[in-house]
Image (cartoon, rainbow, N blue to C red):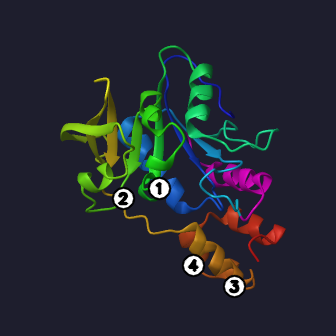
């Protein structure tokens, strides 16, 4: 973790491949930070994602370096190595990473698990998915117009939404919906949705675009500026990634 945390911080774990980290990732993190009053968003590039057996296109070292560059100018954003590759080569599991991070935080800290709607679609397949919200409440950046019942369909067996969602307005006027998740034991945890984010940036599309352009005209056009920070784009070109 790049940032020392003290007192009673509000922290969000934001895991992912970040292959590459793009402006959509930053938009999700910025919205969550404002809406939830977060002190820190921890970007955690994953070493080995169990649901992606073929791995990432770029190495962990390159994805980590790009993530550091992408968030360098963002106050309250930091990199976490909680999802770094394991010496054993075993997959990284969010449940275990959250438990590790929680063990390092002060007793009064509040930890959230932040993800985009595209990631949440596969949530029911996660390792110990039904236990994850009880380590850290989920925060899902959903697509505009996406209904709560559509999100509920991604919940693992043994978890369901209890009651009607409450609309909360943050100081930054970013809409935040708050619901409750309940398990079979009757335990409940908060479940948050950021419903108004129009983020149509795909890492897959970015990689395809880079292969097509081959860095020849990328730096001079506006397309790259709409997808990536300048520092990340320069790193990709300098290291010949995704070609």
Extreme left residue here?
164
- Residue 163, given in percent of the width and then of the height, sits at 17, 36
Whole-Å distance between the Cαs marked 3 and 1?
25 Å
Residue marked by disc 3: 213
Outermost residue on the top side: it is 107
At 53% from the left and 68% from the top, the residue drawn is: 202
Q: CA distance from mark 3 to mark 2?
A: 28 Å
Q: Where are the magenta residues, as a range? A: 57-77
Whether the residues at callouts 2 and 1 have beta carbons within 8 Å, the answer is yes
- Residue 91 vs residue 70, the one in the foreground: 91
Which class describes the residues within 10 Å of circle 2: few (<14), some (14-19), or many (20+)? some
Q: CA distance from mark 1 to mark 4?
A: 17 Å
Choose the circle earlier in sequence order: 3 or 2. 2
Mark 4 residue element:
helix
Q: Earlier in the sequence, mark 1 or mark 4?
A: 1
Q: Quadrant of residue 171?
A: top left
Residue pointed to by mark 1: 27
Q: Earlier in the sequence, mark 3 or mark 1?
A: 1
Instruction: Kindly report the distance in space between the C-alpha atoms of the residues bearing marks 2 and 1.
Output: 8 Å
Quarter of the N terminus within the rendering? top right
Q: Earlier in the sequence, mark 4 or mark 2?
A: 2
Q: Name the one closer to the observer, 132 or 16.
A: 132
Quickly name the residue at label 2: 197
Kind of element beneath mark 3? helix
Tell me the residue that label 4 is attached to.
223
Q: Is residue 217 magenta?
A: no
Taking the image as shown, residue 170 lies to the left or right of residue 90, namely left
Identify the secondary structure beneath mark 1.
helix
- For residue 147, side relative to residue 197 (left or right): left
């Amino acid at each position: 973790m790049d940032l020392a945390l003290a007192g009673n911080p509000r922290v969000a774990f934001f895991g992912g491949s970040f292959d590459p980290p793009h402006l959509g990732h930053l938009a999700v993190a910025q919205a969550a930070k404002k809406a939830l009053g977060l002190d820190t968003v921890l970007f955690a590039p994953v070493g080995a994602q169990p649901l992606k057996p073929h791995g990432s296109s770029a190495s962990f070292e390159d994805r980590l370096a790009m993530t550091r560059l992408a968030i360098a100018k963002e106050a309250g954003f930091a990199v976490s190595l909680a999802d770094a590759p394991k010496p054993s080569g075993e997959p990284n599991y969010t449940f275990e990473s959250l438990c590790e991070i929680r063990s390092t935080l002060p007793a009064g800290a509040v930890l959230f698990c932040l993800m985009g709607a595209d990631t949440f679609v596969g949530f029911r397949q996660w390792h110990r998915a039904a236990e994850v919200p009880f380590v850290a409440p989920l925060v899902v950046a959903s697509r505009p117009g996406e209904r709560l019942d559509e999100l509920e369909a991604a919940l693992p067996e043994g978890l369901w939404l209890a009651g009607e969602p409450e609309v909360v307005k943050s100081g930054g006027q970013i809409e935040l919906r708050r619901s409750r998740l309940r398990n079979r034991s009757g335990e409940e945890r908060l479940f948050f949705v950021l419903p108004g984010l129009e983020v149509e940036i795909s890492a897959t599309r970015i990689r395809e675009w880079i292969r097509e352009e081959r860095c020849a005209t990328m730096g001079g056009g506006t397309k790259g500026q709409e997808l990536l920070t300048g520092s990340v784009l320069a790193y990709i070109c300098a290291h010949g990634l995704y070609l």
